[in-house]
Image: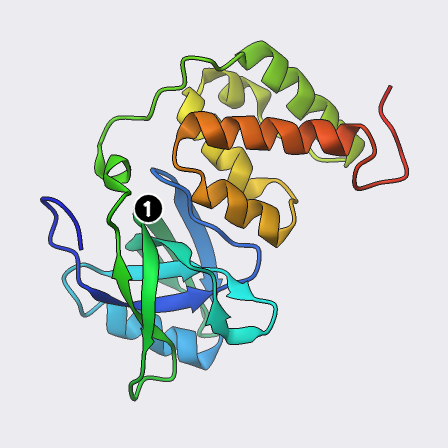
Amino acid sequence: MSRGIDLPEVIPLFPLPGAVLMPRTRLPLQIFEPRYLQMVEDVLKTPARLIGMIQPAESGLESLAQVGCAGRIVAFSELDDGRLMISLKAITRFRLAEVRPGFTPYLRGRVDCTGFAADLSPDPEQDAGFQRSGFIARLGRYMEQRGLSTDWDSAEATDDETLVNSMSMLLPLAAEEKQALLECPTLSQRRVLLDGLLEYALHGGDSEETIQ
């Protein structure tokens, strides 16, 4: 499945609408459905501890997006009511080759990470054309419009990739927009698309209100 890292060819799949895992990020998840509690239990018994985050298509869970991201469980805790809190660390994006039939209550898929070699690098991806101050300004206006808040000191201090990828995950964008951001081949392309989505929203693209 990958260069230099022994990742399994078949991994459990977690179709969760609106939840995407971007390269070199972490995603906290609350697990409560019995089939996904079973999935986490099974995954924790494997050396790789991988779960494939993937978007379900509109037609249902059996129809899935073609690109997802494999994450390793790096932290988990069990609550008194039986729910699990886990944290996934992104390992690499993948293309879904096929959904594998089996006896598990959750989906499993044969995946291929060809074309996503940069995801496996320990170093953040660079974006030489990033105009950070303008992006931060648009992001601030977007969040103000929606009554959202963030730790701006942390946002200013973080590297470009973490900023763009985190915002791609966390902002209240449509599921198809998040999927498009996930599929961008490079950080620069993701940043351009995200910036465009912010501009579109600020000029009333998804609202009757317009920011002057």
Residue 57 occupies quadrant: bottom right
> Percent position (x, y) of residue 137?
66, 16
Quarter of the picture containing the N terminus is bottom left
* Count of number-bearing discs: 1
Which sits in the foreground, 77 or 25?
Answer: 25
Residue 3 versus residue 68 in the image, above or below: above
**Amino acid type, callout 1:** Ala
Q: Residue at x 51, y 27 (%)?
A: 191
Residue 32 visible in the current orientation? no
Residue 187 visible in the current orientation? yes
Q: Residue at x 77, y 36 (%)?
A: 146
Residue 62 versus residue 119 in the image, above or below: below
Q: Residue at x 54, y 18 (%)?
A: 153
> Percent position (x, y) of residue 22?
41, 42
What residue occupies the far bottom of the structure in this picture? 103
Q: Residue at x 22, y 33 (%)?
A: 121
Q: Secondary structure at mark 1?
A: strand
What residue occupies the far right of the structure in this picture? 208
Which sits in the foreground, 86 or 212?
Answer: 212
Categorize mark 1 by other alpha carbons within 10 Å: few (<14), some (14-19), many (20+): many
Residue 128 occupies quadrant: top left
Q: Which residue is mark 1?
A: 90
> Percent position (x, y) of residue 79?
44, 66
